[in-house]
Amino acid sequence: QGHSQGGQNHDRPQEAGQNQNQNQTHCRPQDSAPRPVEDMFAGLSFQLSAALEGEAGEQITRALTSHGGTVVERSDMYICPLTSQRGRGRQLCLSDLWVRACVCHETLLDPRESVMLRPVGGVLPVPELAELKICLSGFLDEEKQILKRFCKTVGIKYKDKFSQKNTHLVCSVASGAKYDKAVEWATPIASQDWLFACVSKRKVLGTKNFTPPQSAVKPASISRSTLLDMASAFSSQSRSSSGIVAPAAVPESGGKRKKGSARTDLNDSFTALITTAATDVTSQEDAVVPVLRSVVFCVGRSLAARRRELFAVGKALGAETRNHADDCTHCLHSGPLAELEIKGPERRPLRVVGADWLLACRDNLRHMHEEDFPCAAGERTVIGGRGRPKARQSLSQMPPTASLSSSSCASTPSAAAAAA
């Protein structure tokens, strides 16, 4: 424990001299001719979410206006809490931590830099990350406060003092007293990108591809004009008849991503949004971002109360909806597969996923990996078709008492009991 306290006191080695210069470089904007700090948000207007009320809203408002920005009732750029669940397809959504991070680093940060800079969405805290107990090393005080707030929101436990009880050490650079002690104790060490990747994938990832850099890395900044173009790409969906389509580089069915890249999903999302093509939009009022245009889904009875909501989200992402499972590619279900009744799934594979999958597709603006969103813990996500697991009875092979007379998708405990 004496070592851990020493690690805390030496969180950033060689505080004077050379390292102070490194700190200044770390927070310096990357633009060749950056705006003065007090003028950082000049020419930009923002709309604040109603959820940012009280002291939190006042802090964000002061941060924006004191650096040249304006807060208005309606804007293409929407500032909302990290926990925001609402999909606002016609506005560029930025988290309140984006504002705080911009002020910390004295530059406009690229919202594609990390999942922390945009609303996370989905279920929060993330249950799969509850086992994590991290400690931070090498970060500036302002950076540390932002990361601590992020960790608290997503359900990752944080400790100031580094000890063997910590599951991971997150470092800005590969040096320092805590770093040396983590090496001695064989505690996994990772960069902050590992944190963001874990939240994006909603599971604890290995640290092999997320080693801390040898020297401080500048945060990725963005020009004012590029930020405005991003916001315009969102708002143009409701003001024109041209649609937003995803380029070939964005996988439609959860293709492989480059390991260690925490920004791949967000980069692909924004690339898709700023790539326009002459295609019809079903409604100017409810513009479509067709990242799920190859998906046809139904909703099981376990989620019947949310059917209208889920259908609306799916249609906004280009998916087709059905009240039955005859020609569906996906079925949204909550609970064990044994409680799901469906007619003839052997005719084609059917992906059975939780509602969180659809919401994650909306929040990340891409087709997320289905296997990361099972309908219940430990359940598979594909039934029917070739490759059906033999270890578990197929739903189509259940006794007739467990089948429906019509080709509908339902989940009833009583039917499951009858099948048993």
Image (tube, rainbow, N blue to C red):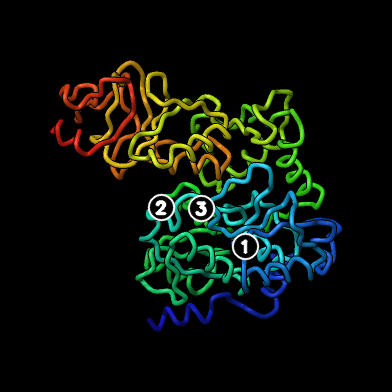
- Residue at the spot of label 2: 204
- Residue at 18% from the left image edge and 25% from the top image edge: 398
Residue kind at label 3, given as amino acid type: Phe
Q: Residues within 10 Å of mark 1 (few under 14, many from 20)?
A: many
Secondary structure under tag 2 reads loop
Distance from Cα at disc 2 to Cα at disc 1: 22 Å
Q: Is residue 135 above or below residue 262?
A: below
Q: Nearer the viewer, mark 3 or mark 2?
A: 2
Which quarter of the figure has residue 175? bottom right
* Residue under numbered circle 1: 97
- Residue 234 percent coordinates (x, y): 70, 41
Picture coordinates of residue 20 (x, y %)? 69, 75
Q: Which mark is residue 295?
A: none
Mark with earlier residue (3, 2): 2
Separation of residues labelled 3 and 2 (CA atoms): 13 Å
Mark 3 or mark 1: which is in front? Answer: 1
Name the kind of residue labelled 2 in the image: Val
Going 37% across and 40% down the picture, which residue do you hit? 303
Residues 298 and 351: in front is 298
N-terminal label among 3 and 1? 1
